Image: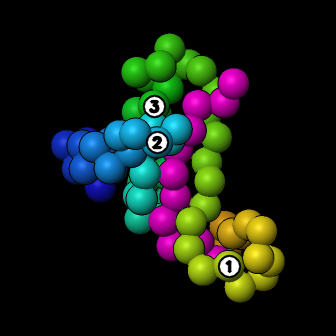
Amino acid sequence: MKMNQYLIPLVKASGYASILKGIPLNDENLASAKWLVKAFHKGKPVRIRWRGKRLHNQSHTLRSEATHFDVYLRG
């Protein structure tokens, strides 16, 4: 995902607690999203929430089952 493509997840996150929302899951997007949020928020810790079907447990999504992820600031 190119940096300008993060504008769509950023706008989709408006009104939510997440900083970025609904980013397709792959290692490149995950690393880029963490770097982008840390760069703009002065190195604050980042929390990732996996999104997708909940096959393993009804309460949460495991990374192995995830198709997308959201990025939150911790604390």
Per the image, label 1 sits on a secondary structure element best described as loop
Q: Provide residue 7's location: percent of width, then percent of height.
A: 24, 43
- Up the image or down, 46 lies above or below 40; here it is below
Q: Provide residue 73's location: percent of width, then percent of height.
A: 58, 31
Which numbered disc flags the more N-terminal residue, 1 or 3?
Answer: 3
Q: Which label number is shown at residue 67?
A: none
- Up the image or down, 9 lies above or below 68; here it is above
**Crowding near the residue tagged with mark 1, few <14, some 14–19, many ≥20 C-alpha atoms within 10 Å:** some
Observer able to see residue 46 = yes
**Crowding near the residue tagged with mark 3, few <14, some 14–19, many ≥20 C-alpha atoms within 10 Å:** some
Residue at which label 3 appears: 37
Per the image, label 3 sits on a secondary structure element best described as helix
Residue situated furthest bottom in the rendering: 55
Q: How many marks?
A: 3
Q: Nearer the viewer, residue 17 or 30?
A: 17
Q: CA distance from mark 2 to mark 1?
A: 21 Å
- Measuring 40% from the left and 21% from the top, which residue is drawn there? 40
Residue at which label 2 appears: 16
